[in-house]
Amino acid sequence: MRKIILADDRPVIINGVRAYVDLAPNLSIAATATSTDELLGRLKDTKCDVLITDFAMSMRRMCDGFTLLSYVKRNYPDLRLIVLTMNVMPVVLYQIIKSGVNGLLHLYDDLGEIGRAIQGCSRNLRYIGPSVRQILRANPLGRVPSPRETEVLRMYVDGYSAIEIAARLNKSVKTVGLQKASAMRKMGLANDIELGRYLCGGIDPLEACLIDDVPKRDFVAADAGKIVKPSAKSLYLKESPHKRRIR
């Protein structure tokens, strides 16, 4: 029986995933958390095999989602880490994959993808859900912003002001502005208008494809259930991605 800790600050997600797990053989919810601080407590006092977590929960002890992922990987190396997100920014999704998570699913994916992701993780394979692969393939870019630049850009898109971002990340407003500008420059975006168009799919992709730099290791193809290499062909989906400004 694989025991799961489920972390998300939206009750509907907690209840939906729990309902699926309750019907799945050999899976059980050992604990739930609705904030990063609560999650850290559950990790200390609850034995589990898999953590399924949101990337952008409310937090006080951690400054951003990437810090949380790094903390979990460093302190619980045997724990299978699956991120379940609503973020549609390709650079954010890419950096989550690059952080070393065992699985990445989008809330556009069917609930059944959770079982497939856990199955893949149990075989030491990385599992990328179909909606994530669709977004990455349809929104390629050239150079990839750093994790910190990506987090600044994500918070900006989520509605935080430069002052709020600086306070949360313990940086100066000037540093935040420079990191935002650097991220946009690497993505080939000249201004906030182009950033908005990019999020809505209105910017033509650059020649280099984002997914080409995904760490070259085996993972499970969500649509085929086979072990494949992360090539452009294996990540291709014909339909255009869902486009929303949501986390």
Image (tube, grey):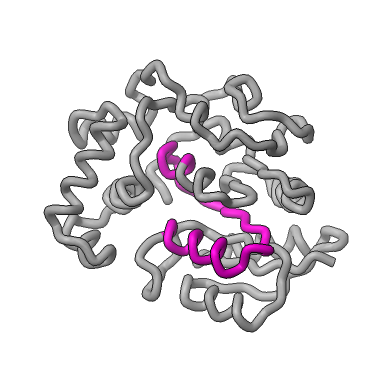
With respect to residue 231, does 161 lie above or below? below
Name the residue at 57% across, 23% down: 239
Name the residue at 59% across, 47% down: 104
Q: Residue 76, percent across and down?
A: 61, 68
Q: Nearer the viewer, residue 52 or 245?
A: 52
Query: Residue 191: which quarter of the image?
Result: top left
In the picture provided, is 241 more to the left or to the right than 163?
A: right
Q: Nearer the viewer, residue 168 or 34?
A: 168
Q: Residue 80, percent across and down?
A: 67, 59
Instruction: Report the residue that reaches farthest toward the top.
Output: 207
In the picture provided, is 48 more to the left or to the right than 165?
A: right
Residue 241 shows in this picture: no
* Residue interval drawn in magenta: 65-94
With respect to residue 113, does 6 lie above or below? below
**Does residue 245 belong to the magenta stretch?**
no
Name the residue at 86% across, 62% down: 26
Q: Nearer the viewer, residue 223 or 109?
A: 223
Query: Residue 181: which quarter of the image?
Result: top left
Query: Residue 57: which quarter of the image?
Result: bottom left
**Does residue 82 belong to the magenta stretch?**
yes
Residue 156 shows in this picture: yes
In the picture provided, is 127 more to the left or to the right than 58?
A: right
